[in-house]
Every structure is written in structure tokens, then in C-alpha cells.
């Protein structure tokens, strides 16, 4: 059995964003719909917010916000959201080396075949900088775009699990850097949900999507994002 292909394209470019769509500190997108319209997204797709850990999803593919497991050459291990996924799927094979924002399905022939690893981008700049905000949206959106493309290529082989793609926030905690909203200790969901919609708008085919939030406060913030 051949290894699943790595998807490492960068189909989305965000050159600039209007500061009026953001909070003054840059931690939050205050008008996601207007920002998406500025970026050419005129039609959005349903992305229901699910409570809890994504590893508990009974059906569908499961996105892993991968970090240190990428290219380690060993069975995936970690903490946080990724660690919970790795604990739930004990048959996972090592995650191959790949660039940030790339995505690949695990090569396990068992239950772990449901897991798609997305290498979370590192958000290294400051939310004070408008250009940095644009790059964050671009990088996170490309991570989701590659995940959707990987799912589209793999869905036929997943059987019943090929009908739904369960997403998670990427670059949302450790990798969020200075973009972590101090009030949430997390990348604000407005960035994540705008990025998901931008990725969906650029996709050749969009599957049924859902996004999972474990932390109740962050989940409430996600529920409040108006798109």
C-alpha cells in the first residue's frame, strides 16, 4: 500500500486587510463577514461548532493540529489536542516530514486512517502589524485548504467516514505566539473561522465540515462569531 500523498500547496494569498475589521489590538476580527467580502468570498458554507475533543467524533475524518510529531520518525506522541488524538488512535504510523501548512493522512490501515495531520504554522509576528494579520489569515487558511484537498483525495477510500471532515483550530495555542488572545489564552476563533471559509471558497470541492472546540470559553467565543 502506497503512502498517502502530502498536500503542500499555497493556493491562498492575502496581501492586505483593512484595519477597520479588527479590534484595536489585533487579537480579534470584529467584522468577519465584511473581511471575507473584501477577500472575494461572497458565499459561505455551514461550519457547525462542536463541543469537546475531536477524537470523540463517531464519524468522519479527524484533523490533527500537528506539531512536534511531524518528521519525528516515531509513533506520534504529544500533549494537548494532538496528544488526545494520538491516545485515541493507538495504531497511528509516524507522520512524515512536511512544510508548515501541509497536510497528509496517516498511513495506518486501521482506525488511524481517519486522521489527517496538518502541520500548524508558527505565528511569529505581532497582531499590532496589519501585514502580519494578513499573513496569519493566509497561512492558517492554506493549512485548511491543504486539509480539504487531502480529504477530497482520500474520501473515497474512507467509506462512511468520507462524508465529513472534522476540523480543529490550528496554530491556536503554542504555535499562536503573540497572536494568542490573552482573554482566551488561544487564537481568537474569528481568525480560525475566517480562514476556514477562505479555504472552502478556494476548494475544488467542499465536503461537509464541522469544527471542534474543547475549551468552553473558546467555544463560546466561536459560537459568537458572525459569518
Image (cartoon, rainbow, N blue to C red):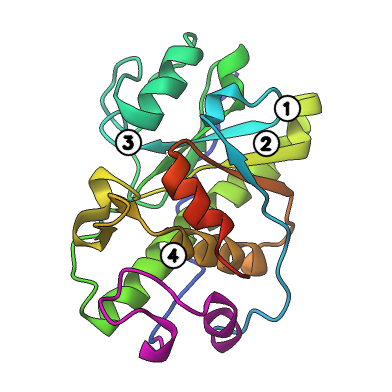
Give the labeled residue for mark 4.
Answer: 191
Give the labeled residue for mark 2.
Answer: 154
x then y, percent, for residue 87: 42, 13
Q: Indicate the secondary structure of the residue bearing disc 3.
A: loop
For the C terminus, the quadrant is bottom right
Q: Indicate the secondary structure of the residue bearing disc 1.
A: helix
Crowd rating for badge 2 (residues with CA inside 10 Å; few <14, some 14–19, many 20+): many
Q: Residue at x 51, y 51 (%)?
A: 220
Crowd rating for badge 3 (residues with CA inside 10 Å; few <14, some 14–19, many 20+): some
Q: N-terminal of the two: label 2 or label 3?
A: 3
For the N terminus, the quadrant is top right
Whole-Å distance between the Cαs marked 2 and 3?
19 Å
Give above or below for 131 relative to 89: below
Viewer-nearest of labels 2 and 4? 4
Viewer-nearest of labels 3 and 1? 1
Q: N-terminal of the two: label 3 or label 4?
A: 3
**Start-end of magenta stretch:** 17-38
CB atoms of marks 2 and 1 within 8 Å: yes
Give the labeled residue for mark 1.
Answer: 158
Amino acid at each position: 500500500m502506497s503512502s498517502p500523498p502530502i498536500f503542500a500547496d499555497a493556493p491562498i494569498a492575502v496581501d492586505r486587510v483593512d484595519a477597520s475589521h479588527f479590534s484595536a489590538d489585533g487579537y480579534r476580527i470584529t467584522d468577519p463577514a465584511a473581511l471575507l467580502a473584501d477577500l472575494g468570498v461572497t458565499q459561505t458554507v455551514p461550519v457547525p461548532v462542536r463541543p469537546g475533543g475531536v477524537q470523540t467524533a463517531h464519524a468522519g475524518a479527524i484533523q490533527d493540529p500537528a506539531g512536534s510529531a511531524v518528521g519525528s520518525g516515531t509513533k506520534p506522541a504529544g500533549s494537548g489536542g494532538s496528544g488526545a488524538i494520538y491516545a485515541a488512535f493507538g495504531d497511528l504510523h509516524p507522520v512524515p516530514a512536511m512544510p508548515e501548512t501541509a497536510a497528509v493522512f496517516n498511513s495506518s490501515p486501521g482506525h488511524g486512517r481517519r486522521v489527517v495531520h496538518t502541520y500548524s504554522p508558527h505565528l511569529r509576528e505581532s497582531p499590532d502589524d496589519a501585514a502580519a494579520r494578513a499573513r496569519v489569515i493566509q497561512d492558517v487558511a492554506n493549512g485548511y485548504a491543504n486539509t480539504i484537498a487531502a480529504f477530497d483525495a482520500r474520501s473515497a477510500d474512507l467509506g462512511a467516514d468520507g462524508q465529513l471532515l472534522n476540523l480543529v483550530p490550528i496554530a491556536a495555542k503554542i504555535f499562536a505566539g503573540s497572536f494568542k488572545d490573552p482573554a482566551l489564552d488561544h487564537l481568537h476563533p474569528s481568525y480560525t473561522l475566517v480562514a476556514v471559509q477562505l479555504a472552502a471558497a478556494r476548494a475544488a470541492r467542499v465536503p461537509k465540515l464541522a469544527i471542534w472546540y474543547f475549551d468552553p470559553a473558546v467555544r463560546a467565543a466561536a459560537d459568537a462569531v458572525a459569518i
